[in-house]
Image (cartoon, rainbow, N blue to C red):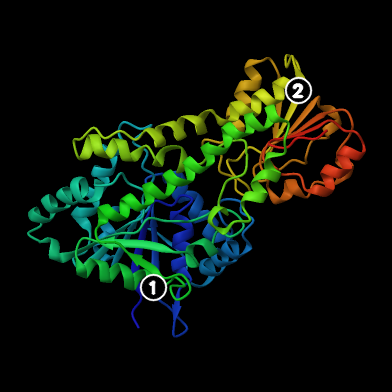
Amino acid sequence: MTKKKVCIIGLGYVGLPMAIALANVKKNNKFLYEVYGHDNDKKKLKNLSIAIKKKRLPFDTLDKTLSQKFAYSSLKNKINILKNLEHLTKIDIVILSVSFDFINNKNAFKNLKGLIQQISKFIKKRSLLLIETTLPPGTYERVLIPEIKKIFLKRKASMKHLALGYSYERIMPGKKYFNSIINNFRCYSGYDKIAKKKVQIFLKSFMNFKKFPLYELNSITECETAKILENSFRATNIALIDEWVNFANLLKIDLLNVINAIKLRTTHSNIMRPGLGVGGYCLPKDGLFAEKSSRLIFKKNINFPFIKLASKINKEMPRSSFQIVENNIGNLKSKNILIVGKSYKEDIDDQRNSPSIYLKKMLKKKGSIISTYDPMIDTSDMPKFSKFDIVIFCVGHEKIKKIPLKLFSKKPYYFDLNNILEDKKISFLKKKNFKLIILGRYYE
């Protein structure tokens, strides 16, 4: 059986794990794919090349499965580096998994069109081009496909010679990084029936589709919309809770207890808990793609008040936590503060749009002396709490949750802004009369 050649363009937090997953796919005890990776970032390619030789991931993760799969593929079926897109002439399946943020990057559309033009010049006829990147609805069909058609016309080829598919990623970095690729529900669509079928066959080759059925949407635009609406719902759900944190403080009630009571209803089980804020690459921007899509692609001025308000609230969310710190401490000038956790979510090292960073900036403006520590990023040991006036827990890394009780001392004022501390630690701190504030919770 001849291995199909697949190339992932964009080797970031989504693309590289996808490459690892495909490099481990077997059928009849033989590897199904010959995997290649390409990225415009030459440093990233160099680091990946070194990582393959060392059989160690180029980034830190708590997911042992992902690390083991990378080591195994490096030994048995390594990911090859594709330095130039001209070599796409030999590739059967091209997966586009690049970042696209035209909310904050004015050149995003221009860069994406340029990349599609380059791919179209060299992509092999009768191959599959599958885009995973989150796009404003209508981008693929109204912006990218016309560019592909122009170049294929110059190549004296028709669109029948290329299968165009779309299937947005739902990868979840953290302890179940690899698992989120294989065992997850996936939506997909294609330019025509043939393309849809090719995408379906490809996804079924590496996903647990019997347990997590694939969902085919009518068009690529419909599939793009699914991702935007999905993340808009999540962002709005998060924003809703922030105003209730302030109200709970006024009422002097335990908001977390209230939420736990509500979550017992299965129809309300996904109500969010209070937290420091929203970060990462997707949620801060994806909802805003809808308004941009209607205006720039479809030339209509459709307003999205809920999404805009949710985005604004989420951006300002760390301010609620900051005000809780300031209200309890008073004058923050010259206060020696330790922020524990710098990444945007637990068990990863990604700091993009991290609410911890926004909190740090607000504290510094008040004249505080700030130190930060994150076990997923820093190689040094956890600083001694006794050296600080205030210790703020921001990210619930597994390593942070396992901090021993002996590290706590009576001197600092402790703030838990993401419900990180387990009940055992909370009881210990309260019994010792240590100063502790937990976001969304009230104690007599």
Q: CA distance from mark 2 to mark 1?
A: 54 Å
In this rendering, position of residue 152 left or right of residue 233:
left
Q: Is residue 141 above or below residue 20?
A: above
Q: Amino acid at mark 2?
A: Asn
Residue 390: quadrant of the picture: top right
Q: Is residue 164 left or right of residue 39?
A: left
- Residue receiving disc 2: 328
Which residue is denoted by mark 1 in the rendering? 204
Q: Position of residue 75 (x, y in %)?
A: 54, 69
Q: How far from the left and from the top, in percent, is residue 377?
A: 64, 42
Place of residue 205 in the rendered image (x, y in percent of width and height, measured from the top left): 39, 74
Q: Position of residue 286 (x, y in %)?
A: 40, 42
Question: In this view of the protein, can residue 173 be seen by the observer?
Answer: no
Residue drawn 59% across the image and 54% down it: 174
What SS does tag 1 mark?
helix
157 versus 318 height, above or below: below
Residue at 35% of width from left, 83% of height from top? 1
Q: Is residue 315 visible?
A: yes
Left or right of residue 125: residue 293: right
Within 10 Å of disc 2 (Cα), the crowding (few <14, some 14-19, many 20+) is: few
Instruction: For marks 2 and 1, give the one nearer the viewer.
Output: 2
Secondary structure beneath label 2: helix
Q: Quadrant of residue 217?
A: bottom left
